[in-house]
Amino acid sequence: MAAQRTKPAVAQRPIPHNLPAEESTLGTMLLSLDAARAVVELVTAADFFKPAHGHIFHAITQLLAKPDPRVDVVLVDEQLRQNGLHDEAGGSQFLMELTTATTSIGSAAKYAAIVRNTAVQRRMIATAAQITDLGYMTDDPTTAITRARQLVADLDATRMIHADEPIELIDWSTLHDRGDEYIDGVLMPARWSAWCASAKVGKSTLAVCLTTSVSKGISPLDGTRRDPLTVLYIDAEMGRHDLHERLVDLGHDPAKLTRWHASDLPPKLDTAEGGNAIVAATRQLSAAIVVIDGINGVVSGAEKDDTTWRAFYDCTVRPLKRDGVAVLTLDNLGKDHTLGPRGSSVKLDKADAIVRLTRTDNGIRLQATHRRSTAFDAELTLTAYGLDGTEAVAFRRTSSAWPDGTSDAVALLDQLGLPADAGRNRARQILKDAGRPMSDNLLKAALRYRKSHVETIPLPLEEGPQDETF
């Protein structure tokens, strides 16, 4: 019988390092100023396993920092003497040996990548040891887990690099105009809108109502026609049976919502695996809008832990925004409504708009407490229709006084031949070409007025129970 292979004990395993790569990295730096400049962008003195190599690298960086940077064996030798580390670094003879041992100056970045990656491996081992110690020594597992997460996050900041894979630069030619708001003043491409409200205000009903309308080619706030958009609804709040009931209450046959897709089994979106799964599904569906209902239910970390929400943004929200997707998250307010949503203070710090929802006598009011763009409405009051079962449920923008100058702005847009269904980006371009500037607020009002005065789509009543509550 063949002997069974066993994994060597941790103490018997060699510590990851590569001395030839370290020597070749230093050799290229001694022979080429360009190579030296390239290498210092990839590694630090602490990345070298052999202390003498770290001393030499540090001396080279000191020479590079001078007004007239020059690097060679003689200058590095002298710098090491000034640092009091000449002998510890191996002396003059060792510096000469480094230059003769180098095989290719052009491979400096590849040598440096090996040095960096073995350093990361050593840090992984050290981090694992620290986490192991936490497991043995703590009486508070919650605190220990939080500390362990921070250690891993710190390690991720020093992740391995690959010399053949530089950072990706933006190719502006690949970015096209993704159009205007998907829902005027509420949702727009490549932006994250974070809704928060007390329980039972109706945020889920509103989110479902607005996005199902968009998926059917109806502008939800005025009932006009628009191009349909595909929606992915991630439900971590209601469950499929309640979600089905909500759709029926809104007058829909869920099986006929061909552009509105939902999942009530979301992965954890503060992990790379979970984020990749959502991004892949979004791309497969060509979804323009992703709704995450119940944000606290889609993370694995503690809601009061900063690293949880940084990971959520980095793993899920950022890549969705990069793909031009509009992201809408729904969250509950804490007991003290003045403090905003429950959890860490960094939970929503990267949201493009934070919107608080409150009930009114006949609808819902949306107030933006923070917004990065005036494209988001500062305040929006919606009137609810159909809650008595006489028609399909809908939310419409409550009529209000138009700002001064709206009629003149509308007349100008008509004069310039702007189609009634045109959006803000196209209107801006036409105004710019005509040399007729207009403020954002006035332009928004004029566009909204024009859209509200075209023929709207009647709200069909489909059979199904109607809920008189939100």
Image (cartoon, rainbow, N blue to C red):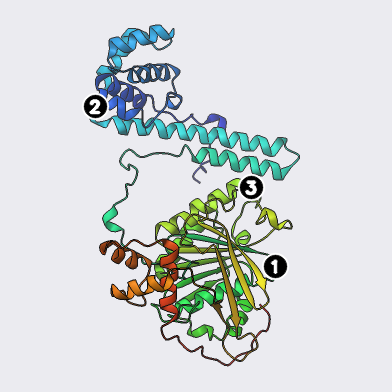
Image position of 206 with respect to 438: above or below: below
What residue is shown with label 1?
199
What residue is shown with label 2?
105
Q: Is residue 181 visible?
A: no
| Label 2, residues with CA under 10 Å away: few <14, some 14-19, many ≥20 | some
Query: In the drawing, does residue 311 fall left or right of residue 406?
Result: right
Image position of 312 with respect to 250: above or below: above
Q: Secondary structure at mark 2?
A: helix
Q: How many marks?
A: 3
| Label 1, residues with CA under 10 Å away: few <14, some 14-19, many ≥20 | few
Q: Are marks 2 and 1 in contact (CB under 8 Å)?
A: no
Q: Nearer the viewer, residue 436 or 226?
A: 436
Q: Residue 457, position in %: x, y?
A: 45, 87
Q: Residue 397, position in %: x, y?
A: 54, 76
What residue is shown with label 3?
305
Sooner in the amino-acid sequence: mark 1 or mark 3: 1
Query: In the drawing, does residue 414 fall left or right of residue 280?
Result: left
Query: In the drawing, does residue 147 fall left or right of residue 174?
Result: right
Q: Of the residues shown, which amino acid type is indicated by label 1?
A: Ala
Sooner in the amino-acid sequence: mark 2 or mark 3: 2
